[in-house]
Amino acid sequence: MTDLEQYCQTVGRQAREASRLLATAGGDLKNGWLRLAAQLIRDRIDDLVSGNVRDLEQAPEYGLAEAAVDRLRLTPDRIEGIAAALEQVAALPDPVGEVIDGHVRPNGLSIIRRRVPLGVVFFIYESRPNVTADAAALCVKSGNAVILRGGKEALHSNLALYRVLADALQQAGLPENAVQLVETTDRAAVGHFLGLSEWIDVAIPRGGRSLIERVASEAAMPVIKHFDGVCHVYVDESADLEMARSIVLNAKCQRPGVCNAAECLLVHAGIADQFLPIIGPAFDEAGVEVRGDDRVCRALPTARRATDEDFRTEYLALTISAKVVDSLEDAVTHINTYGSHHTDAIITSDVSAADRFVGGVDSAAVMVNASTRFNDGGEFGLGAEIGISTDKFHARGPCGLRELTSYKYVVQGQGQVR
C-alpha cells in the first residue's frame, strides 16, 4: 500500500469511528459546536482573509475564469455570511430521531420509521470556500461525519476554515474527526476515497461535469449528483411584461456565475414583438450578450446567431441564449431536451398554463412567476445546502438536513412471536 492509499484509508476509518459517536450525539452538542464555530470564524477573520489572498494570488496559474475567481473570493461580508449560515443551521430542528410515520399492527406491534444519519459523506467540490463550512455544518447537524475534498485552487482558504471548525469540534466535545479536510491536492486521492465503500456511505460531487462524471463512474458507493445548471425562463403569451423583464434580469444578472442563474430565455411567439424590444435594451444596459435564433436576431440587432450547442451551454457569465417558441408545449420540449433538469421558470398570468408547465417540465425545481435564483437551500428555508441535486434518487433539489438522512424501522412489541 502506498503512502497515499494509507492516508486515505486512515481518513476513512477515522470518519467511520466519528460517525458512530455522532449518531447518538444530542442536538445541544451539535448546536453548541455550530454557534462556537460561527463565533470563531468572526474572531479569526484575518486568518481567513490571509488564506484566501494566497489562493487569489495563485488563481492565474490555474487559469480560472472570472466567474470562478468570484466564487473563490472571500470578502468580510461573505465571511459574515458563512458565520450567519452556521447559526441558521443551529436554529433548525434536528432531523435525527424524527418519526416519519408509524402504525400499530393487529397483533399489537408498533412500527415506526425514524430518521437516522447516512453515516460518512465524502464531499468533493470546487472553488467556493463557503461550501466547506456549509457542508460541515449540514453533515454534523444531521449526524454524519464528512470528508471534505475541495479544489486545489481554494486549498489555503479551505485549510483556514477547516482549522476553525476543528478547533470548535474539540472545544464543543464532539469527535475531532467528525470533519476532516483532505490536505493533499493529488488527484489520485479522489480515486482511493471512491473505493472505500467500507468506510464511506455516500459521495457527493459538486463542480464541473467532468468531475461529476468521474465520481459517478468510479464510486463504489451511492452518489448524489449536482450537474450543470442550464436553467430557463419561459415568458408565456399571457405574461405581465414588466414582471417578465424584472424576473429575467434578476435570473440572469443578479449573480451570473452560479448554477441557478438563467442561461436561456424562451419567449412565446404571441408576445415576442412586445417583449423582445423591452428585454433587448435591458440586456444591453446590463452587458448581457444574447445568442438567439433567427426571430430573436431579427428583433435584437446586437444579438448573435445561436448554435445548437449554445442552447446546451451553462455560461456562468453575462451571456444568454434566446429563442422564440410557438407554444407552451414547444417551450417544455425545448427545456426537457436542452436543459439539465435543475431550475426552470414560467412567467404567466394563466393558471392553466402554469399547471401545464409545472407538470411537463422534468426539473428539480420549477418556478412560477419567480426568479430561478430562488432555488437555494437558504431561500427554501433549509438553512444551507450541500448542493442542488439533479438526481431523482435519493434526494432532488437543494440538499439540506433531511436529505442527508435515511431511516430505520423501529418495532416495539410486548413479547409477540411469529
Image (cartoon, rainbow, N blue to C red):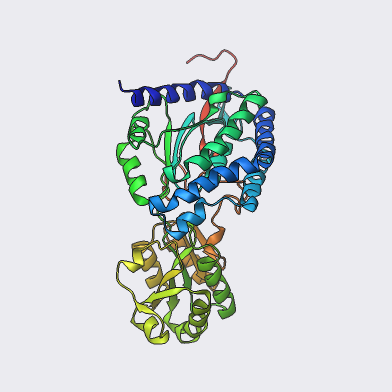
**Number of marks present in the image shown:** 0
User: Picture quarter containing residue 89?
Assistant: top right
Residue 12 drawn above or below residue 406: above
Residue 238 in sight here: no
**Quadrant in the picture for the N terminus:** top left
Q: Is residue 344 visible?
A: yes
Point out residue 313 in the picture as x, y percentages from the top left corner: 36, 63
Answer with left or right where residue 22 lies relative to residue 334: right
Look at the picture and state if 120 lies above or below 66. Answer: above
In this rendering, the answer to whether 125 lies above or below 176 is: below
Return the x and y of residue 298 as percentages of the image width and height. Answer: 38, 86
- In the image, 289 versus 359, the foreground residue is 289
Residue 389: x and y in percent read 45, 48
Residue 415, horizontal then vertical, whole percent: 57, 12
Q: Residue at the location (58% across, 73% down)?
A: 246
Looking at the picture, tell me which residue is in the foreground, 54 or 281. 54
Q: Which residue is found at the position 35% from the left and 51% from the top?
A: 209
Residue beneath the point at 40% across and 24% down: 7
